[in-house]
């Protein structure tokens, strides 16, 4: 389990009961997403949680094209995430989210 409590099987892209989860780095722009899990060490997971990026958070990718970081929005807040960090965050589109 990750420090935030989700089981992750990376090879099968299965996180908990979300078989359609994909890394945030692979998400398209302007799609509403729900963060369903992370694959990171304790320090990074705690840092992301302090920024509000914890399972259940609603986010939207504002910019992903070109070099440099991804720009994501959470509510009225925008933040830049490096592509390496974004690759450790797993999301599902809102319309595909199943409540547990």
Image: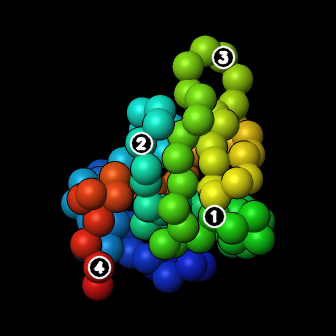
Label 3 sits on residue: 67
Labels 2 and 4: the sequence-earlier one: 2
Labels 3 and 1: the sequence-earlier one: 1
| Horizontal relation, residue 74 to residue 91: left or right | right
Instruction: Mark yes or no: residue 44 visible.
Output: yes
Q: How far apart are marks 3 and 1 (CA)?
A: 23 Å
75 or 84: nearer the viewer: 75
Occupied quadrant, residue 67: top right
Q: Which mark is residue 53?
A: 1
Label 4 with label 3: CB-CB less than 8 Å: no
**Mark 2 residue element:** loop
Labels 4 and 1: the sequence-earlier one: 1
Label 4 sits on residue: 99
Residue at 63% from the left image edge and 64% from the top image edge: 53
Query: Height in image: 48 above or below 78?
Result: below
Label 2 with label 1: CB-CB less than 8 Å: no
Q: Which mark is residue 31?
A: 2
């Amino acid at each position: 389990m990750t420090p935030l409590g989700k089981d992750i099987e990376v090879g099968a892209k299965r996180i908990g009961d979300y078989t359609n989860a994909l890394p945030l780095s692979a998400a398209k722009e302007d799609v509403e997403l729900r963060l369903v899990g992370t694959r990171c060490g304790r320090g990074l997971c705690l840092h992301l949680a302090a920024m509000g990026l914890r399972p259940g958070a609603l986010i939207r990718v504002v910019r992903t094209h070109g070099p440099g970081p991804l720009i994501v929005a959470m509510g009225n807040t925008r933040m830049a995430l490096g592509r390496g960090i974004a690759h450790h965050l797993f999301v599902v589109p809102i319309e595909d989210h199943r409540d547990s």
